[in-house]
Amino acid sequence: MNSMSLLIQIIIGFSSGIAVGLGFIALLTMLKVIPRLIHLSKNIKNSWTFIYPVIIGTLFGSYLSFTDYSIHLPLIFIIVFGLLHGIFNGMLAAALAEVLNVLPIISRRIKLHGQIRKLMMALVFGKTFGSLFQWIIFVKI
């Protein structure tokens, strides 16, 4: 492989990483996840407690994605990490659904007028049972 080809691959890889990172930050900004958390917790003075973990988690996740480094932790740490990961994904999905007004549209389309609570519970239980099924059947610890 010549040096020009290697340089082009480096530029493309770096540009792609920047594009994905900016897309992620744009999504968090558009959904106002962090400002909403700060507002709900009524903790404006300590807003860094919400901002820094996102930055550190993004950098750490990027580091782990680009290296072959693996961390061997006790099962309790893996469970806690999985719960925190699930909470973040759930909040992100809920914020996206709220912004797009997905649930009222779905309830009208499937003719569940006034029964959004049942629709929400069906989504929660479906996600929970689906995740448990995946972890119990497919993930071997």
Image: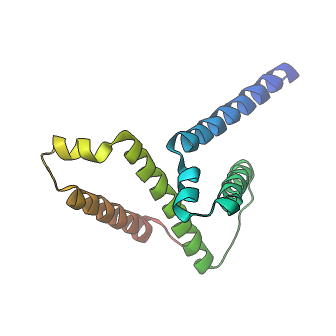
Quarter of the rendering occupied by the N terminus: top right
Determine the residue positioned at 15% across, 45% down: 110
Q: Position of residue 96 (x, y in %)?
A: 43, 45
**Colouring mode (rainbow / by chain / secondary structure / one colour):** rainbow
Within the image, what quadrant is residue 23 found in? top right
Q: Position of residue 63 (x, y in %)?
A: 74, 51
Left or right position of 11 against 61? right
Q: Position of residue 55 (x, y in %)?
A: 70, 52
Q: Residue furthest top?
A: 4
Name the foreground residue: 35 vs 67: 35
Q: Is residue 98 above or below residue 4?
A: below
Total marks in image: 0
Determine the residue positioned at 73% across, 51% down: 59
Determine the residue positioned at 55% across, 64% down: 41
Left or right position of 138 against 72? left
Q: Is residue 25 above or below residue 67?
A: above
Determine the residue positioned at 41% across, 71% down: 136
Q: Position of residue 75 (x, y in %)?
A: 59, 78
Within the image, what quadrant is residue 44 found in? bottom right
Name the foreground residue: 130 vs 88: 88
Within the image, what quadrant is residue 70 found in? bottom right
Left or right position of 4 against 108? right
Q: Is residue 83 above or below residue 100?
A: below
Quarter of the rendering occupied by the C terminus: bottom right
